[in-house]
Image: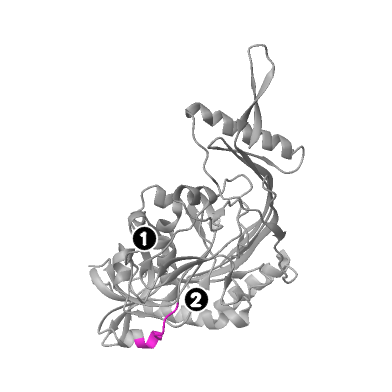
Amino acid sequence: MMKRLIATKDHTMTPIASHHELETREHELRKTRMLMVDGNLTQNLRTVDRGVSARAYVDGYWGFGSEPLGGGADRERVQRQALSNARSMARFGARSPLALAGVRHVGRQQHQGRTPLTPAECNERLAELHAWCKRRYPGLRSTRFMIGDEHHGKSLTTSLGGDSFARIDRAACMFTLVGEDTSGAPIEVDEWISGRGTLADVDWSLDTLAPRLERAHEHLQAKRHAVTARGGLQTVVLAAPLAGMLAHEAMGHPCEADAVIGGAVTASLVGQAVASELVSMVDFAHTYEGAPTLIPVQVDDEGTPGRDVVMIERGILKSFMHSRETAARMGEAPTGNARAYNPHDEPLVRMRNTAILPGTSTMDEMIAGVDDGYLLLKTGNGQADSTTEFTFGITLAYEIRGGKLGQALRNTTLSGSAIKVLKTVDAVGDTMHWECGGYCGKKQPMVVSMGGPALRARAHLGGQ
C-alpha cells in the first residue's frame, strides 16, 4: 500500500491509503521497408520511434502516459501523468482494486545476428531477383518484391522490483508474380518468406528463392485456366499456412481473456469439446521443441515471464491467454500475453506464437483420401469474430477428384464457425510450418507468428 495526498480546507495535505502500482517502459521501434515493382524501387522507408511510457494502477483504475524519447523526455513527468490519469478515473466511482499477481522479473533478452544489410545491398538483390524473373518469364505482366524488417527493444521497470529488457527482431520478403488468364484478366500468385532477425538473417537470396519462384510461376500458369469452385459445404485440405491462420484468427482471438470477459463464445466452453480429438492448439511464449520461436516473448510488457498456454488439448478447450488484470478477474495466473506494439501503446492481451500441433498424416495421404473436394494453399486475408465465425480469402487452390489434384480455382472464400470446422478434422499433417510476415490487428498492430500442419476438414466455399 502506498500513500497519496488530498487537500484539506486549510490547504494542508493529508495522506490516505492507496493501492498503487507503476510500470515504466522505454521502447525503441525501428522499421525498414523496400518495394520494387517491375525493376523500379518505389518505396524505401526507414523509421525510428523512441518513447517512454508509464502505466499506473491506482485504486482499481489504470492510467497511462507517454512522451517521445529525445529532447526533454522525462520519466518522472510521464509517471506523474500516468498516476494523475489513473486518479482522474476515480470520478467514475469507487472501485475495489484487483489482487494483481505480484510478478517480478529481472533479466535481459539477447540476440546474436548477422551484420545488417545496407540499403544498397538490399536494392542490388531486389534488382537481381527482378532481372532473373524478367529473363525467365517473359510473359509476366508484372513483378513485385517487398522486403522489410523491424526491431523492438523494450526496457521495463516496475514498482514491484521488475527490471527487464526484451526484444523482438523479425524480417520478411514477399514476392508477387502477375500474369493474365485466357480472357486477359489479371491473375497473381504471391509468397512470404519470414523469420527471426534482420534481412541479413533471413535467406532471400536468388539461389533460395529460385525454386519458390518456379513453383509460383507454375501455379500462375495453372490459374490461367482456373475454374469456379462449387459453393457450399465441401471437404477441404487446408495447407499449413491456412491452418495457422485458422488457429490465430478464428480460435486464438476468442481465447484472449479480455475477449472472453467481453462475451466471447469460449467463456462457457472450458472443459468441453471445441475440436476433433486430433486437434491441439498452443500459444507458445518463446520456445518450440527446444528452439526459439519466431517471436520469442521471454517477458511481456507488464513484466510477467512468458509461459506457454495450452488452449485446446485433444479437442478440449483448456485455458486462455492472460494479462495480470484478466488473470485476476478470472482467478487464474497471468501468462505473459500483455503486449504493446509501439512506444505510445498500452499493453493488451495479444497472441505470441499460436499454432495447431502436428499429427501423423502426410499431405499426399490427405489428398488421396478425398474423392471430391479441394486443396486450399494460400490466403490473402482473414477475419473472425468472438463467436469463432470466420471468412478467409483464398487466392490459390485446386480441385481434388478421386484422390488426385485437378484444375486450379479462381479466387474464392472459405468461411464457417471455427469450432464446427475443427470438429470435422479427420487428418492432421505431420509437417510444421511457421511464418511471421504479417501483423495482427486489435486496436493496435502486433507482430506475431502463426504455425500449423495441414488439416483435412469440412467448411463452406464461395462459388457458383
Report whether residue 2 is seen. Answer: yes
Residue farthest along the top direction in this orientation:
10
Report whether residue 185 is seen. Answer: no
Tell me residue 308's x, y (percent): 53, 66
Q: In this view, does 322 lie to the left or right of 363?
A: right
Report crowding for label 2: few under 14, some 14 to 19, many 20 or more residues within 10 A (C-alpha): some
- Name the main secondary structure of what is drawn in magenta: loop
Look at label 2 and name its amino acid: His
Q: Do the residues labelled 2 and 1 touch (CB within 8 Å)?
A: no
Tell me residue 372's x, y (percent): 24, 81
Which sits earlier in the primary sequence, circle 2 or circle 1? 1
Q: In this view, does 458 lie to the left or right of 243?
A: left
Tell me residue 449's x, y (percent): 53, 66
**Residue sitting nearer the eye, 66 or 141:** 66
Q: How many marks?
A: 2
Q: Is mark 1 on a helix, strand or loop?
A: loop
The label on residue 204 is none
Look at label 1 and name its amino acid: Val
Mark 2 highlights which residue? 433
Report crowding for label 1: few under 14, some 14 to 19, many 20 or more residues within 10 A (C-alpha): some
Q: What span is in magenta?
A: 358-365
Q: State whether residue 149 is above or below residue 182.
A: above
Question: From the image, which quarter does the C terminus lie in?
Answer: bottom left
Q: Is mark 2 on a helix, strand or loop?
A: strand
Residue pictured at 62% horizontal, 83% vertical: 207
Q: Does the magenta stretch include residue 302?
A: no
Colour scheme employed for the rendering of this structure: one colour
Q: Does the magenta stretch include residue 362?
A: yes
Mark 1 highlights which residue? 270
